Image (spheres, helix red, strand yellow):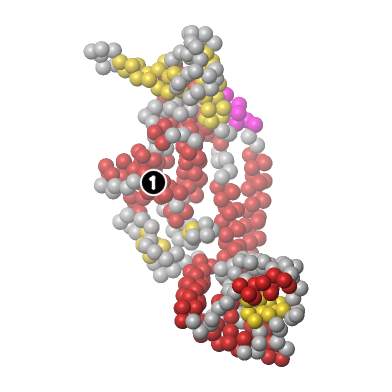
Amino acid sequence: MKIFAYFYREPLLEDNLENVVNTLKLEQVYYDLGERYELKKLLKDCQENPPNYLLIRQFSELGDTAKDVKYNYKKLTNLGIKILILENQKLTNLDEVECLEHTVKIDINDPNILEIIDKNQQHLSLQKGQALRRIKALPPPGKAPYGYRRGKDCYIIDRSTAPIIKDFFEQFLLFGSLRGAVNYLAKRYGKKISVSTGSRWLKNPVYRGDLKYKNNEIISNTHVAIISREEAAQIDRLLGRNRKLSSKTASAKHSLVGLVSCQKCHHSMIINHVTQRNKKKEYLYIRPQNCPLQPSCKAIPYQDILQKTIDYICENFPKKVKSFNPKQIENYKNNIQQQITEKQDIIKRLPSLIESNILDEQTAQLRRYNLNIEMSQLRSKLEQLPPENLKNIADAVSLPRFWQDLSEAERRFYFREFIRQIYIEQTSKLEWNLDITFIV
C-alpha cells in the first residue's frame, strides 16, 4: 500500500506543523510553506506514479480557493487516489488508515460542501489580512482607543481627548485610587466611565506607545505614547499592590487600611470610627476583624499606629535599602540592553538579506515582527526593575518632616509603594509592638 501526505502551512497563522501522521510509514510527504510549490509537484508525481491514499489535514490544503480545491480533488480522485481528511486525528498504523477510509465519505459536488470550503477560504483570507497588518505593526481593525484617532499607518494623538486620559493617569499616580480617578473625570470633565473601563485604560499598552493584538503579542514604540515608561512602570506596581486588597480598601480614605494585620490572631485589622454624643470630634481605632481569640485582641488608636509606622520607616527603611546593590541591577540592565541592541542590528540587516534573495519580503516581515515581540518582552523586564534612585528615595522618606507634609491619600500611596504588610503584636492590654515587612 502506497501512501502520500500533503501538508500546507500558512506562516502568518501557524507557528508549528503538528505531526499528525506520527510513526506511520509514508512513501512521500509534501510540505508547503505559504506557496504551493510542493502541491504542483504532488500533482505531477501522482500522474506518473499514483499512490493508494493521500492524507491531508483539511480540504483547504488543496488550494487557495474553493474552485482550486474542487479542481485538484477531482484531478487526484480521477487517478484512483483516495483522499483522506485527517482533521485532528493522528494515525499510527495502516489499519487506522483503512478505518478512516470507511468513516470519511465526502461528495465534492455537494453544494453544501463547496459552500463550507468557500467560507473557510474566505475566513482564512481574512485572517491572513489581519496577520499581515500585525507583522507590519499596523493598528488592529476597529475604532481607535479613547485619546487617539486613526492615522495613515498608526494611531495619532487626539488633542481634544488625550488631555483627559493624561489627567486620569496623573490622578491615579498621585493617589493610587482607581475609583478616585474615575470620580475625578466625572467631576472635572463630565466624562463618566465605569471602574472596569478605567482599569482597562490603566492596563492598555496603547497608552504606552505599544500595540497589543488578539494573540496577546505586544509590539513596542509603534506610535506616540500618552504616558512615559516610568509612569507605566509605576502604574503596574500600584495595580500589583491594589490587586491584593479588596476594591474598597484600595481606595480607602485612611492610609493604613488593608496593610495592618494582627500577629496574634492573624486577622486583618479594620478601622472603627467612634464619636461622642453632641460632639463633632471623631476618634479612630484599629482592631482585628472577627478576632477568634478569647478575650479578643483590643483596639488601638489609629494615630498611635500611624505615628509608630512612620517612625519605623524612618529608622529601618534606609537600612533595608543599604543591602540594595545598584551595581548588580546595572549589570542585569546592561545585559538586557545588549540583547535588545543585537536584535535591532538583525532588523537593520534584513533589507540587505532581501536584496541578496536570501529572504523573501514576507519571511523578512515575519522575522522583523518576531524580533520586535522579543524586544518588547525584554523592555518589559527593564521596566519592572527597581528605580535606580532607590537610595535617594530612601533618604527622603526617612525624614519625619516628609510624612508630616503629606495628606492621608498621599501617605497611602507611599505606604503601598514600600510596605508589604504591617504586623501588630499585642503584649498586654496597653502595650503592643509593630513590625513591617518591606517590598524592597
> Is 404 one of the magenta-colored residues?
no
Please state the horizontal and vertical placement of residue 77, each as a whole percent of the image. 62, 86
Identified at 45% across, 56% down, the residue is 206
Q: Nearer the viewer, residue 170 or 51?
A: 51
User: In the depicted view, which residue is nearer to us: 351 or 76?
Assistant: 76
* Residue at the spot 59% in from the left edge and 63% down from the top edge: 370
18 relative position to 380: left or right? right
Spot the residue most to the bottom.
Answer: 48
Residue 192 image offset from top left, x and y in percent: 29, 47
Instruction: Give the residue number, with chain letter if any, for mark 1.
Output: 196
Residue 112 shows up from this direction: yes
| Residue at the (58%, 43%) spot, across then down | 385
Q: Quadrant of the C terminus?
A: top right
Most distant residue in the left direction: 278
- Is 148 located above or below residue 20 in the figure? above
In this orientation, which residue lies closer to the viewer: 419 or 192?
A: 192
Dominant SS type (magenta): helix
Furthest toward the top, the residue is 429
Residue at the image position 47 percent from the left and 54 percent from the top: 205
* Vertical placement of residue 329 versus 78, above or below: above
Q: Give neighbour class at mark 1: few <14, some 14-19, many 20+ (Cα, 10 Å).
A: few
Give left or right: position of 306 versus 332.
left
Magenta span of residues:
316-323
Q: Amino acid at mark 1?
A: Ser
Query: In the figure, residue 51 lies in which quadrant?
Result: bottom right
